[in-house]
Amino acid sequence: MSERELDAAGIAGPELRQAYAHCKRLNARHGKTYFLATRLLPVARRPAVHALYGFARWADDIVDSLDDTTATEARSARLTLLQRDLTTGLGNGDSSEPVVVALADTARRYAIEHRHFADFMTAMRADLDITDYATYTDLRAYTYGSAEVIGLQMLPVLGTVVPREEAAPYAAALGVAFQLTNFLRDVGEDLDRDRVYLPADLLAAHGVDRQLLHWGRDTGRPDRRITAALREFEALTRELYREAAPGIAMLDPVARPCIRTAFVLYGAILDAVAQDGYRSLRRRAVVSRRRRAAVALDGLARVTTARLRARTAGRQAAPVPTPPPTSPPPTDVRPVHEGVV
């Protein structure tokens, strides 16, 4: 975490600053697409996004890390401990876990509803026991806690130009779209964890079962039935992107380039999967550096435009005192929908 970001966010105290820095490192290491998009946010809002991501990453790693051979019972115990730390931290800001310290501070600053974190932890616990989903409806019940609430947590940080509850469904849909994109990209890796997120009825409609998926993972050979199932799941995911798209215009203008960049880059993952012949069972499709750079440059241009407009609007909104002034003019004019700071 740069000193500039922490100073701009008004984050003081060495322990708190170190906690936010820890979250930023987690974001940079594990969420490269998300991290790139976050760089397009106003400096003061970046630490909060890193805190939200850092906590989610930490909890997810307890459940999912392929490098960790810890037994399920031990993972459950670690998750229970994190849940206790979270409850305590949200109550008084105190925790031995840096991710909880930063998250609790962000939740207080932006008045994020605590139930969103509780719902997320419920979804993480489900991953310890549930290894597949019978229907798309069942999957969406899971993604409420694992993805929708992430969008809802982000909304107060991003700010809106409409009432927050009006933008909430779109933010939730985008959270699910991002996660389903990851599910499609990571089919093989998830199978290594003995987990299949693609709904069983969707797979069965194309003649696919776990045995066939394992065959595809082990051999790396394509199969038209698997390809058809992945293509249908891609179509479901793209529908969510279409559903979420109108919500971008509901965000604070200076936050829109960040979310638009994430929107485009995650959508590009779907393109990469398709271009790779839907071979997600064998390897992870990646977006080319050229594509990522082009989207990032477009985002930077949009950021510049948005910030110039925000400054102009701020100057126009500032009151012009008539001599002799009865009080000094304001020195800190902020957009109406800047968000809680």
Image (tube, helix red, strand yellow):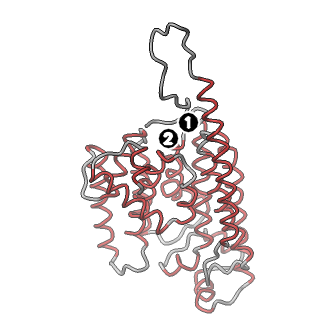
Q: Regarding mark 1 in the picture, which secondary structure is present there?
A: helix
x, y percent for residue 169: 60, 44
x, y percent for residue 292: 66, 66
Label whose residue precedes the other's in the sequence (1 or 2): 2
**Residue 233 can be seen, yes or no:** no
Image quarter (top left, top right, bottom left or bottom right) of the C terminus: top left
**Residue occupying image coordinates x 35% and y 52%:** 102
x, y percent for residue 196: 55, 73
Q: Nearer the viewer, residue 132 or 289?
A: 289
Q: Which mark is residue 329?
A: none
Mark 1 neighbour class, 10 Å CA radius: few under 14, some 14 to 19, many 20 or more: some
Tell me the CA gap for discs 1 and 2: 8 Å
Residue marked by disc 1? 164
Query: Considering only vertical position in the picture, is 282 above or below 249?
Result: below
**Residue occupying image coordinates x 61% and y 82%:** 283
Image quarter (top left, top right, bottom left or bottom right) of the N terminus: bottom left
x, y percent for residue 22: 36, 61
Q: Are marks 1 and 2 in contact (CB under 8 Å)?
A: yes
133 displayed left or right of 26:
right
The three-letter code of the residue at mark 1 reads: Arg
207 displayed left or right of 178:
right
Q: How many marks?
A: 2
Residue marked by disc 2? 156
76 displayed left or right of 41:
left
Query: Considering only vertical position in the picture, is 78 above or below 95?
Result: below
Q: Regarding mark 2 in the picture, which secondary structure is present there?
A: helix
